[in-house]
Structure formats: structure tokens, C-alpha cells
Image (cartoon, rainbow, N blue to C red):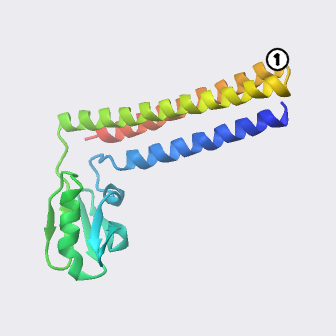
Amino acid sequence: MNSSTQEVLSMLTENQEQIFSSLKQNLSKIRAGKANPSMLSSVMVEAYGSMMPLNQVANVNATDARTLTIQPFDKSVLGEIERGILGANLGLTPMNDGEFVRLSLPVLTEERRTDLSKQAKAMCDQAKVNLRSARKDAMDAIKALGEDALSEDEVKDGEGAVQSSIDSANKTIDGIYQTKESEIMAV
């Protein structure tokens, strides 16, 4: 395979890695019945005159499978942390005891598990759409090279390599979804 085709394939691989990373980050925000500090990654808190991510004003820990504790670096922001959690619409009610903010995660119902599974599926479907876009860009780049520097056989080989890479990435996304779905549906 020619070096320009290799460059297109390496750019496609980088795009795939970004898609996988983004997908995993988004899926980590879906609660699977177990408390995870990353669930609060989207919470913004007004502190010291500006909006800051929760992890910059407090330590977030999972004390057990259903409880998160948030210990602020400065106790004066406890109320702002509560407001930030409520404002993030996570479906969690914070409890402030003067030193910590505690979040108790309710047990998931079967209906809620199904909804979360559908959310995970939608995120995976969006990742597949992003993959198709990356495939189109790679195919266009190879066709453009075919007009300038590649023979028809090299173009066909390059397109085949791109499709093979995309097929493999789709299987990876399906595997990520299966893992997350089994995590969500486990009682």
C-alpha cells in the first residue's frame, strides 16, 4: 500500500479512537445501578465568582454501591454544590450534613433500566453515524488520491482497507454496547 493511503488510514484510525473515547465517556455518565463519581462530571458549581466543574471544588467518592459523597475543599460552597447537582437534572437529591454532600442513588426499576439501555443504544448509534462520516471522508480522500497519484487497483485496495477498518470499528462499538447493556440490566 502506498504512503498516501497509509496516511489516510492512520487519520481514519485517529478518528475512530476519538469516537470510541467520546462514546466511552458518554456511556460512563449513564448510571448502571452502581455509584460512580464520573456520573457528576457534567455538574457545574458557581464558586469564587465563576462556574467551575464539581471536581475542581470538591472530592467526589463512591462510599458504597449506592452512595456518593462530595467533600468540598471549602465548606462555604456546600450550598452551591447542592444547587449545581439539582440544576444538572440528574434525578438525584443531595443531602447536606454541614461537612459533606451525600447522594443516595435509588434502586433502578425495570422500566428505568430499559430507558437507560435505550439511551446507551442511541449513543452507540450516534457513534456509528460518526464512523460513517469518517468513512466517507476517508473514501473521498482515497478517490482524490486516485485522480492524482494512485492506480485504479490501489484505489480499490485503499477503499477495501477503509471499509475493513470501519467494519471492525462497528463491531467494537457493538461490543461496548453489549457490555454497557449487561451492566445496566444486571440487578
- List the residue tagged with mark 1: 152
**Element under disc 1:** helix
Percent of width and height locating residue 22: 48, 46
The number of numbered badges drawn on the structure is 1
Q: Position of residue 16 (x, y in %)?
A: 58, 39
| Residue located 27% across and 82% down the image | 74
Q: Residues within 10 Å of mark 1 (few under 14, many from 20)?
A: few
Give the quarter of the image for residue 136.
Answer: top right
Residue drawn at x 18%, y 65% is: 83
Relative vertical location of residue 18 with respect to residue 35 in this rendering, above or below: above
In the figure, is residue 113 to the left or right of 166?
A: left
Q: Quadrant of residue 133?
A: top right
The quarter of the rendered structure image containing the C terminus is top left
Q: Amino acid at mark 1?
A: Glu
- The residue depicted at 37 percent of the width and 72 percent of the height is 56
Q: Residue at x 46, y 38 (%)?
A: 176
Q: Could you tell whether 79 is left or right of 68 in the image?
A: left
> How far across and down, in percent of the image, does residue 36 sit?
33, 57
Q: Relative to residue 127, is residue 59 depicted above or below?
A: below
Residue 135: where, in percent of width, then height? Answer: 61, 29
Q: Quadrant of residue 163?
A: top right
- Depth order, front residue of 183/140: 140
Side of 173 relative to 11 (left or right): left
